[in-house]
Every structure is written in C-alpha cells, then in structure tokens.
C-alpha cells in the first residue's frame, strides 16, 4: 500500500518536472535574431479585397487572368468591363446586370421581365450565350470574310467581333467592318466598336453556335 502511495506521488511530480524543463527558455538564445526592429510591417490592401468592415460584401466577381483566352475568360473579361461582374447592377441608362443588357435586346432573345432578369444570375448567363449565338449567326459571313485581316489597326478576330456586337449590336459591327473602320460607333460612355474589337481579340469563342432563333429557356 505504501509502495502504491509513493508511485502516485512520484509519477505526477516527475511529469511536472519534465514539462517545466521543456517550457523553460533557453538562455543561449539570442533575442536580437528574432527582433522586428527595422522591418516594414505596415501593410495596406484595399477594403474590397480584405473585407475588413463587418458585414461588407463584395458585389462583383474579380476577373482572374488565370482563365486566359478561354471562353470563360472571354465572358468574365467582358463582364468585368461592362459591370465589374455585378449581376445586380443597373447603369444610368437602364442597362441591366452582369453583361449590361438593354430591355429591347432581352425581348429579342425571349426575356420580357427585366426585374426577373436582374435578380436571376442563371438567366443572365443563359442570356449572354443566346445573344452571342444570335449575333454570331447575323455576322457569320462577316466573320468568314474579315477574320484575320487588319482594319483600323486592329486584327479582326471572332471574339472581337462578338464583343463589339454585344456592345453596339451586330448592325454596327457590319458597318465598321464593311467601311474598313470609317464607321466606328461609340456608346454613351465612349466605348467604340474598334475598342471592343481590340480589347477582346483572340479569345476562343468556337463553342458559340450560330443560331438565328436563339432564345433563353430555364
């Protein structure tokens, strides 16, 4: 019994001694080696990235260059230019959503309720595809005729044509191409057909199938 009592005292005492030795600071360490003196520790990043304010929500998707020249890269680059990727924005001219559609364009692809469109990201993504399919059908001959040529200092590509058609409509793109850059329509904010053709040049839009009757269905 005495033997058991001694064990119950010695073992816990030994454990405590070992823990104390492990935690005791090493006197040979040089604290100067771990000093932060002279280091620049005042880092600043934007609020929208850090979200430092409680309850702050980022309202748009940041475009990432890792998408490269893929079709997803095309969509996101164009969306970032149009609205900074914000599905729920309306500009001063009444254009709606991530890709900034006008009400009349929406009607052409079968969407008659702008309010429903604005609050439905899935509908907006489908609208982008349907509109691109229709524009590609309208411009199919111009794509074949002008792709690879230089007009007004810009190399014509299919993605550039489709981006410019999204901005100003396929008719305006036809006029630009067939006038060899003389007829260069700009929108109310100063973005022109030529600018969009250059900015969105060289993306892979081969997945877009020309469709005269492209419509959106959920």
Image: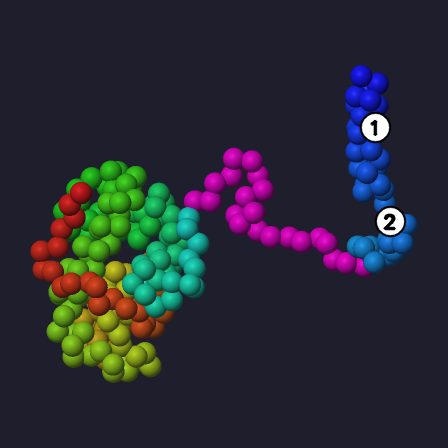
At which x and y percent is residue 203? 31, 69
Along the line of sight, the residue nearer the viewer: 139 or 70: 70
Along the line of sight, the residue nearer the viewer: 114 or 38: 38
At which x and y percent is residue 163? 28, 64
The quarter of the picture where the N terminus appears is top right
Looking at marks 1 and 2 on the same chain, the residue that comes earlier in the sequence is marked by: 1
Residue 21 falls in image quadrant: top right
Left/right of residue 210 with respect to residue 20 in the rendered view: left
Left/right of residue 75 with respect to residue 84 in the rendered view: left
Report the residue that reaches farthest toward the right: 27
Identify the magenta region: 37-59
Q: For numbered disc 2, what is the local secondary structure?
A: loop
The quarter of the picture where the C terminus appears is top left
Between circles 1 and 2, the one closer to the viewer is 1
Label 1 and label 2: CA atoms lie apart by 26 Å
Residue 26 marker: 2
Residue 104 visible? The answer is no
Main secondary structure along the magenta-highlighted residues: loop
Residue 206 falls in image quadrant: bottom left
> Magenta includes 111?
no
Chosen colour scheme: rainbow
- Mark 2 surroundings within 10 Å by alpha-carbon count, few (fewer than 14), some (14 through 19), many (20 or more): few
- Mark 1 surroundings within 10 Å by alpha-carbon count, few (fewer than 14), some (14 through 19), many (20 or more): few
Along the line of sight, the residue nearer the viewer: 111 or 25: 25
What residue appears at the point 22 percent right and 50 percent down from the top-left corner? Answer: 126
Residue 173 marker: none
Residue 6 visible? The answer is yes
What residue appears at the point 15 percent right and 60 percent down from the top-left corner? Answer: 134
Above or below, 13 against 175 in this view is above
Q: For numbered disc 1, what is the local secondary structure?
A: helix
Q: Which residue is mark 1?
A: 10
């Amino acid at each position: 019994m005495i033997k058991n009592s001694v064990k119950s005292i010695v073992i816990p005492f030994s454990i405590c001694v070992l823990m104390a030795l492990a935690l005791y600071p090493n006197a040979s360490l040089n604290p100067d080696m771990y000093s932060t003196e002279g280091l620049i520790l005042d880092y600043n990043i934007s609020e929208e990235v850090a979200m430092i304010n409680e309850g702050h929500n980022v309202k748009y998707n940041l475009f990432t260059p890792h998408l490269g020249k893929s079709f997803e890269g095309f969509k996101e680059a164009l969306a970032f230019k149009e609205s900074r990727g914000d599905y729920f924005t309306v500009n001063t001219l009444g254009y709606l959503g991530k890709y900034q559609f006008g009400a009349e364009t929406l009607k052409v692809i079968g969407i008659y309720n702008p309010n429903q469109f604005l609050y439905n990201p899935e509908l907006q993504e489908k609208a982008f595809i349907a509109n691109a399919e229709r524009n590609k059908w309208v411009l199919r001959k111009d794509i074949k005729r002008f792709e690879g040529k230089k007009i007004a200092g810009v190399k014509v590509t299919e993605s550039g044509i489709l981006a410019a058609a999204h901005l100003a409509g396929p008719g305006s793109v036809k006029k630009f191409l067939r006038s060899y850059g003389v007829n260069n329509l700009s929108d109310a904010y100063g973005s022109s057909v030529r600018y969009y053709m250059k900015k969105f040049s060289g993306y892979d839009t081969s997945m877009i199938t020309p469709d005269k009757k492209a419509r959106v269905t959920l």
